[in-house]
Image (spheres, rainbow, N blue to C red):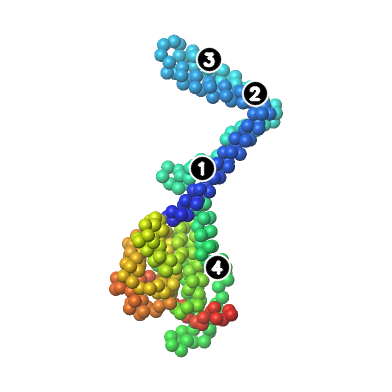
Amino acid sequence: MAYSAEVLRRAQARLAQEKADCEAESTARIESLYRQYPRLKQIDQAMRQSVIKAVSAAFKKGGDTTAAIETIKEENLALQREREWILEANELDEAALEPSVICPHCGGSGYVGAAMCECLQELCRQEQKKELSSLLAGKETFDSFRLDLYPTETDPVTGIRPRDLMQNTFQLCRRYAREFSKLSPSLLFTGAPGLGKTFLSACIARTVADSGFSVVYDTAGKMFADFEAAKFGGERSELTDKYLQCDLLIIDDLGTEMTTQFTLSVLYQVVNTRLMEHKPVIISTNLPAAAISQRYAGPIASRILGTYQLCPFLGLDIRTLRR
């Protein structure tokens, strides 16, 4: 998964610390046993020396190499038998004298060859969930979404019952989150403020992240600010890489930013790059489709309105109703 550089750095730091703690625990445990049974330490040291002697004998020129190796082998076997006897007599598990490995697949490096190991992936998922939790309110779940807050009366402008429309939108969002894959479509949430766009975006973010995908959730203003910092402030490219590389990008409140040539350029870069690489985006905006066409340059509006699945939101301001 394409986790952001910051998430990966924090996960790697945690793995390194856990590996160091594991090694320290192993060393303390083995040294404690050696203090109780000094002969075990002598045997283990002698066995390590026997390996060195065997290698040295194998490369030694002249003399009876075969006889030397055979002698070393017999000494080693005798040490092994004595070691086994001490362990058995004191009811000790042989594993107690072996260093613990934090991960049997990668040994704590975080990678198996060039592939990220499951242990590091899990730490990345945990760090990503922490990051999302710091951005979201913490209460957004599909189970807590309230359809009863949407009117059942027909809207006079659209001729649609808001609750019926929102039931379809809710079911689409829940199915999208549960079945998310890199082939999932991009979504466009449109509607007036306070209708649940941010809430359902957050529900999707949590569910998709829990499934192990990398998710970046930010407001449009924060995204543009990051690109500005990267370009004009000499900041690290990781500020912007995350918007292009994550499995799912969620941009909240598009249309609230000040529209400039720079923001249009950034939005085109993000939308077009992710479209070309088949990486899903969810955009929420208070702007209707017509206003999107007017506000954003033709290529941007064409890509969003032409390729994103429209998810309309209709009803009364839920924030006001809750108050």
Please name the residue that numbered disc 1 is placed on.
108
Q: Residue at left 50%, top 19%? A: 53
Q: Which mark is residue 71?
A: 3
Where does the image place residue 308, in percent across and percent down from the top left? Answer: 38, 70
- Is residue 29 placed above or below 151 in the rendered structure? above
Instruction: Please tell me whether mark 1 sits on a helix, a strand or a loop.
Output: loop
Res. 245 in view: no
First in residue order: circle 2 vs circle 1: 2
Circles 4, 1 touching at the beta carbon (< 8 Å): no
Where does the image place residue 183, in percent across and percent down from the top left? Answer: 40, 61
First in residue order: circle 2 vs circle 3: 2
Q: Which mark is residue 137?
A: 4
Q: Which mark is residue 294?
A: none
Instruction: Please tell me whether mark 3 sits on a helix, a strand or a loop.
Output: helix
Disc 3 residue type?
Answer: Thr
Question: Is 276 left or right of 249, judged from the image as shown?
Answer: left
Please name the residue that numbered disc 2 is placed on.
39
Q: CA distance from mark 2 to mark 1?
A: 31 Å
**Viewer-proximal residue among 237 and 248:** 237
First in residue order: circle 1 vs circle 3: 3
Mark 2 surroundings within 10 Å by alpha-carbon count, few (fewer than 14), some (14 through 19), many (20 or more): some
Question: Is 321 left or right of 272, judged from the image as shown?
Answer: right
